[in-house]
Amino acid sequence: MQLFAIVFLGIWGSTLIGTTDMANWILENTLTVLFSIFLIVTYKRYQFSDLTYLLFCIYLCLHVYGAKYTYAENPFGYWLQDAMDFERNHYDRIVHFGFGFLLAYPMREMFLKWIKFPRWVSWALPIEITLSVSGLYELIEWAVADILFTEQGAAYLGTQGDIWDAQKDMFLATLGAIIATTVVSSLKEIFNIKEEDKN
């Protein structure tokens, strides 16, 4: 946990120093701050596995790297666009997919080991919550961009002219969660890893 925190704080600090749009950086990192507070507050009461902290670290690093340049103008996204001959910068799509793929397992761990939900619920909830949170996030993006901070709207949304951007983001996040839970479930079956079912 401490190592992951140090790595993340180093990367987070570098994104602040090198940001090309401070107002966007602040907007994008509001959720980063809230998520970090959640991890700090819960650490004494419940500690996640090392794998979960690694997944958290990877996801947060992807997110803050996107905030450094704005998602639509991310250098890695431009490189990928040129290399794969894409029509747009897909960095935001990578992060939305990562939201589901990287956070489904941590959610499952929390439901199964912390909240003590039945095993079948712990498989289903990460997918359902990923879809729900993705929809809520798109509504928050709309409110921030169109009502609260109109000057930062285009940079914050990063739709790049795609009228179906919100729906595609939600789909990719949900697909990521489905793939992650399927992979974990398959590995447990292959290696015959047993879990205690609470119901």
Image (cartoon, rainbow, N blue to C red):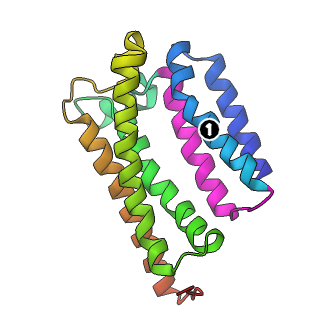
In the visual, does 149 lie left or right of 191? left
Report x, y in % for residue 48: 69, 62
Location of residue 49 with respect to 20 vertically, above or below: below
- Percent coordinates x, y for residue 189 in the rendering: 46, 86
- Residue 73 visible to the viewer: yes
| Res. 72 in view | no
Q: Which residues are magenta?
A: 44-69
Foreground residue, 29 or 95?
A: 29
Horizontal relation, residue 2 to residue 26: left or right: right
- Residue type marked 1: Leu
Image location (x, y in percent) of residue 136: 38, 42
Element marked by disc 1: helix
Q: Main secondary structure of the magenta part?
A: helix
Which residue is at a point 28% across and 37% down the rendered structure image?
166
Q: Is residue 27 placed above or below 41 in the rendered structure?
A: above
- Decide whether residue 63 is among the magenta residues: yes
Residue 60's spot in the image, x, y percent?
A: 58, 41
* Nearest the eye: 125 or 160: 125
Q: How many marks?
A: 1
- Residue 93 lies within the magenta run: no
Residue that mark 1 sits on? 34
Query: Which residue sits furthest top?
Result: 151
At a point 52% along the width and 36% down the height, the residue shown is: 63
Image quadrant in which you'd find residue 145: top left
At label 1, counting other C-alpha atoms closer than 10 Å, the crowd grade (few under 14, some 14-19, many 20 or more) is: few
User: At 61% from the left edge and 42% from the top edge, which residue is drawn?
Assistant: 35
Which residue corresponds to the image point at 27% horizontal and 29% vertical from the top-left?
88
Q: In the figure, 30 relative to 101: above or below?
A: above
Give residue 7's quadrant in the image: top right
